[in-house]
Image (cartoon, grey):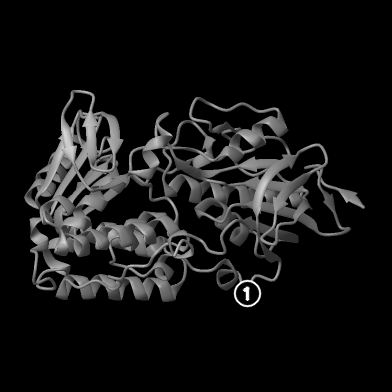
Amino acid sequence: MAIGASGYAIGMGTHRVVVVGGGFGGLNVVRGLKRANVEVTLIDRTNHHLFQPLLYQVATALLPAGDIAPAFRAVLRKQRNAKVLLGEVTGFDAQNRQVHVDLPDGTSRTVGYDTLVVAAGARDSYFGHDEWAGAAPPMKTLEQAVDLRSRLLRAFETAVAAGDPKQWLSFAVVGAGPTGVELAGQLADLARRALKGQFREIDPRDIRITLLDAAPYVLPPFSAPLRDHTRRKLEQLGVTVLTGAMAESIDDTGITTKDGDRVEARTIIWAAGVQASPLARELAEACGAEVDRKGRILVNPSDCSVTREVFAIGDMVNLNDLPGIAEPAIQEGHHVARVIKARLNGREAKPFKYLDLGTMATISPGDAVADIKKLRLKGLVGKVAWALVHITFLVGWRNRAAVLAQWGWNIVTGRRAQPIILEPMHAIERK
């Protein structure tokens, strides 16, 4: 057996790479090792890759869930050195190089590795008020988006027979970052175009949407001209924008701010904060690493490593305080795959260097903003740039074609592909 300069065994047996999490970072590691002499095991608690930037379009009935969530086995069907394990990772044994996994049948398994890549992502943060989750559910998973779609559509149906219909047509979105802005804009379009003429008893255009944030303006990462444009366009859509408004309490009928103002809303959506997956802390404890105040594990900025054999990428890491968006995770995933291949060949890869491609947010079917270094786009030009970027990063040509077709259909007709209500399983089981 020969030993390369990396310390990896070369020539006898196959190098085992375990990737935890199949989001943007993890999936790009797996695909980047397609031609490497490795055996890759992708472990995830779902069977699909989720394109989170378009999750709000599932929640607002514009896209079917499957169009933004291709199954891992379909994506990796031609990659002979990759396999998928459906399970929940519960811990790590760095000394013995093992990952502990709970399987769907209730049993547990340890999976050994030579190299481990953890890309477990992030979850919602209620800033110490987890009790708000019942009244203001988050939208981070496909299941949550489908459930939110049902809640939004059910509100219109409930308004039909309600004594005060406008009470049920009141909505609030907490958090005026890209997700909150996009949700508010799509919800306004859903009511004013997609549902127009479909109700005899109520007018969906009577909808009242409030977007609120503790920050002094919408889209904090963007330049001032684009923030101003976004706010103005949202208000033209009928969205009430409240900035500098921090939530003090949230209940089933609305939000009370720290200033004592009351926002009445029967449907509340949480889009305000995120925190690293609990696996970041688990990994840090197993490897003797540190986490920051947001629970993100600190990694070596040159190669995303925690130890020589362990890497961490994406929203669960602090790498020079890069933002928790798709692009850093994608680039980190590509880089870690290059590092692994280089070490297997007895070389060292070049240090990681992040290429900032800017930030984008869509406001309405014909308007978006894009802040790309010194290039500031808005309106239709911004929308075209936004659409090109999102279509490019979608996984699979079928998904790209389907999403483009749905967008085109919506622009021409105003109609939406999935205006259906599905009851959650727990609600069905109670009947």
Direction from residue 212 to residue 350 in the image, left or right: right
Residue 337 placement (x, y as % from top left): 62, 52
At x 27% / y 70%, what residue is drawn? 419
Q: Nearer the viewer, residue 206 or 414?
A: 206
Q: Is residue 41 visible?
A: yes
Q: Name the secondary structure under disc 1.
A: loop
Query: What is the three-letter code of the residue carrying label 1?
Result: Lys
Q: Quadrant of the C terminus?
A: bottom left
At 15% from the left and 40% from the top, the residue drawn is 241
Read off the residue under disc 1: 78
Residue at screen point 25% across, 63% down: 153
Q: Is residue 287 left or right of residue 264?
A: right
Quarter of the image holding residue 371?
top left
Provide residue 183's location: percent of width, then percent of height: 26, 52
* Residue 303 makes an appearance in the image: no
Please rate how many residues cluster around mark 1, counting C-alpha atoms within 10 Å: few if below 14, some from 14 to 19, many from 20: few
In which image quadrant can residue 226 be found?
Answer: top left
